Image (tube, grey):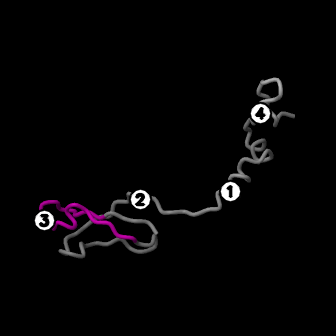
Amino acid sequence: MPTYTYKADDPAADCPMCGDGFETMQTISEAPLATCPSCAQAVHRIVRHMPQCVTNHRWNTKKILSDGNLKAKGFKKLVKDSSGKYVDVLQD
């Protein structure tokens, strides 16, 4: 779930909670808060933290960096051969 930061719309009429800003965790589909839970002052949402996305990095990396995928996307894969020179192993 993403963490959202809320801050008072009117900095002159804020409480310590919404004046400095406060954070709350909400689902993406949940409506943003309209008022401060402490003083009922109008607040606005600031997105500061990216949602946590968990993937299987080992599987993704293997698939993305496979020779077939690199060749299909037009990349070069340089590998050092026995003479010390780098050669493109994806060339036809």
Nearest to viewer (mark 2 / mark 4): 4
Reading the image, the residue beneath label 2 is 49
Mark with earlier residue (2, 3): 3
The picture places residue 12, in percent across and down from the top left corner, at 12, 60
Looking at the rendered structure, the kind of residue marked 4 is Val
The kind of secondary structure element at disc 4 is strand
Residue positioned 77% across, 30% down in the render: 80
Q: Distance between the residues labelled 4 and 1?
A: 21 Å
**Is 55 left, or right, of 25 in this rendering?**
right
Q: Nearer the viewer, residue 47 or 49?
A: 49
Question: Is-magenta flag for residue 24?
Answer: yes
Residue 58's mark? 1
Residue 79's mark? 4
Residue positioned 22% across, 62% down in the render: 9
Dot 2 alpha-carbon crowd within 10 angstroms: few under 14, some 14 to 19, many 20 or more: few
Write the start and end of the magenta stretch as one range: 6-25
Reading the image, the residue beneath label 3 is 13
Mark with earlier residue (3, 4): 3
**Is 68 left, or right, of 41 in this rendering?**
right
Report which quarter residue 88 is drawn in: top right
